[in-house]
Amino acid sequence: MRIQLLSALLMTVALALTACGGSETVTAPDDAAAPAESATAPPEAEAPASEDHSAASKGGQVVETGAYHMELVPVPEADGIHLDLYLQTGDTHEPVADATAVAQVQLPDGTQQEIPMEYDAAGEHFFAFIPSQVSGEYKTVIQTDIQGEKVNGRFNFSK
């Protein structure tokens, strides 16, 4: 027990010195590599498997806002950028079709464009096209109106 405490103390001092500008690498002794388990520590309960609602299911960027899940998928094309917006309920990821969506886009050169998005019922998503061939970062705000409720998401992507 004393060896483990001494090893832990040495590691703490070494980490503190390293954080304060030390350049030496400190390696923990083999017996200190794993923390000692307490005989009175309760076993860790396994967390129930749950779906990560903030994960990108279409390969885009996700914003969870209120009760909604927004995923923006920008697809560069020869003459611009195609945008797909998957607007879904946050808990069950059911598509929200009865909404309006507008993309407010700041192009890399600083110019602004407001692009209305259309709904593709077969694909269960909104889409738009940015007619720009400028390379760089595109800052985009998606503004939606879902039966009178304003829901916005901010995204950045590069072409």
Image (cartoon, rainbow, N blue to C red):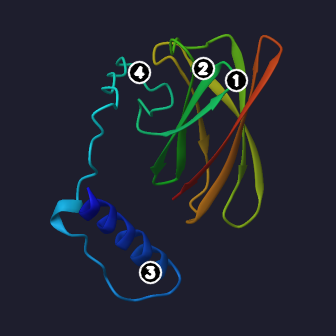
Mark 3 lies on a secondary structure that is: helix
Q: Residue at x 61, y 50 (%)?
A: 131
Image quadrant of residue 6?
bottom left
Mark 4 lies on a secondary structure that is: loop
Q: Mark 2, residues whose alpha carbon is within 10 Å: few (<14), some, or many (≥20)?
A: many
Q: Which residue is mark 1?
A: 66
Q: Residue at x 23, y 60 (%)?
A: 33
Task: Specify which label sits upstream in the sequence, 1 or 2.
Answer: 1
Which one is in front in this view, the residue at disc 4 or the one at disc 3?
3
How far separated are the C-alphas under marks 1 and 3?
42 Å
How far separated are the C-alphas under marks 1 and 2?
21 Å
Which one is in front in this view, the residue at disc 1 or the one at disc 3?
3
Q: Which residue is mark 2?
A: 119
- Viewer-proximal residue among 57 and 44: 44
Kindly identify the amino acid type of the residue bearing the numbered disc 3.
Thr
How far separated are the C-alphas under marks 4 and 3?
39 Å
Q: Residue at x 40, y 89 (%)?
A: 23
Task: Specify which label sits upstream in the sequence, 2 or 4.
Answer: 4
Q: Which residue is mark 4?
A: 51
Q: Are marks 1 and 2 in contact (CB under 8 Å)?
A: no
Mark 1 lies on a secondary structure that is: loop
